[in-house]
Each structure stands twice: as C-alpha cells, then as structure tokens.
Amino acid sequence: MSHNRRQLLAKVAYLYYERDHTQAQIAKELNIYRTTISRMLKQARQLGIVEIKINDFNSDLFALEEQLKQRYHLKKAVVIAGEPHANHQRKEQLLSTEAALYLKQIIKPNNIVGFAWGSILSGMIGQLQHPIQTDATFVPLVGGPSPSNAAYHVNGIVYDAARTFGGHSLFVDAAAVQESKYIRDGILTSNYFRQIRDCWNHLDIALLGIGGATLQYQ
C-alpha cells in the first residue's frame, strides 16, 4: 500500500476518532463516498493504523462471550475474569456476584422467577449493593436438598430473593428425592403444590447451576 493511501486512512481515522466528526461530515470534507469512509475506518484498524483499547477491562473476555454466543446459539453469555491464586470460596463469590448483577439487569416487574439450589445461587442475593423493587414472585424449581446440603435449601434462597427484590416467595415443603412414587404423587397433587406448578408453567426467568468442569486423568 502506498504512503499516500496510508496517510489518507490516518487522516480519516483522525477526523473520526480524534475530532469526533461523523462519517457523513468526513465524506463531504474529503469528497469521498460515505460508504467508502466506513470501509476505510475498518481498513485502518486492520492495518494497525488505529488501535482501539478499552481501558480497565480485558476485551478478550468480551470476544470470548461473542464466540460462545455464536458457537452455542446463545442470546447472552457473560464471562468473568478469575483472580490469581483465588481459592474455591472466592471463585464462587465472583460467580454469585455476577449472577446477581445479571438477574438485577434482566428482571422485570411482576416476573415469575424460579431458583434451583446450590452454593452459587445461595450466595447471589447478598452480593447486591442497591436492590430494586419488582413485586416479582420467586419459586423453587426443585425440592429441598439432602441434610448435608441444608445450607443451600431452595426455600431460603427464594425467601432471600423475594426480600431483596421486594417480591413474594413460595416454598416447597418436600425433598427433591422421595422414598416412593406414592409419596411423590401425593405431593404433586396437593393443594399447596398446585400453585408452584402453575408458576412453573409461567416462568419468566429460571436460575440453576450446572456444576463445574471435572478433569479426568488416565
């Protein structure tokens, strides 16, 4: 590419990025088609004449989010940065915080929001600095966990969520795994469970964990 062409690309970039001229203004000033200006700005970035840097954030994370969205046909993907030497508890806190912020971003008034149980979901609500009032309804998506995981009971999670977001909560008075089909059927046909099932059929948001990656060595 000739020196004159690179100089023209640099001038277009200067007018656009440094002087805040619109592409239409640059096209008129340099007597170049508006669509050509757009291509020139793209070419200036490709050639390294212009480098765009997002301060205080790792733009590689945003690029990874876009790759995940395209690869798995997702509407939204959020990738968070880890911290050097962070322990398991700190990693869970980072995930809980990001999940809480995302819920705050997408929740709408009078939504029906379902929660499963687990350490990440249990840690979500306490991470919000400025809760909002939604009048939403929060419901369990599954029965309670085993006694060994009682700290992550779904009833406690939906209660905390309703209190934080100014909404209502429903509780499930049963464990996730029952001893027999007879007991299971009795729960599913009970009066209190009908309201939960109706909410399941009209969920706006569902939050659940899928666990972490497990590495296996041969």
Image (spheres, rainbow, N blue to C red):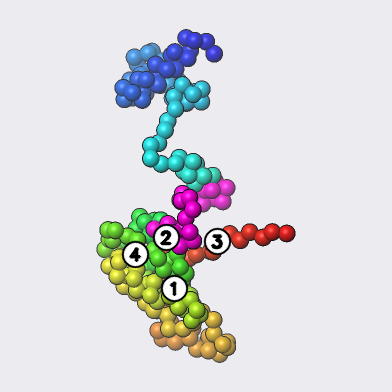
Q: Dot 3, how many residues are within 10 Å of its Cα: few (below 14), some (14-19), or many (20+)?
A: few
Callout 4 secondary element: helix
User: Of marks 3 and 2, which one's residue comes earlier in the chain?
Assistant: 2
Task: Give me the C-alpha separation between circle 3 and circle 2.
Answer: 14 Å
Quarter of the figure that contains the N terminus: top right
Circles 3, 2 touching at the beta carbon (< 8 Å): no
Q: Is residue 215 left or right of residue 92?
A: right
* Amino acid at dot 4: Gly
* First in sequence: mark 4 vs mark 1: 4
Quadrant hosting residue 169: bottom left
Place of residue 73 in the rendered image (x, y in percent of width and height, measured from the top left) = 54, 50
Comes first in the chain, label 2 or label 4: 2
Residue 108, image x and y in percent? Answer: 33, 60
Q: Is residue 201 above or below residue 28?
A: below
* Span highlighted in magenta in the image: 68-97
Q: Is residue 88 magenta?
A: yes
Q: Earlier in the sequence, mark 3 or mark 4?
A: 4
Residue under label 1, please give it: 152
Q: Which residue is mark 4?
A: 126
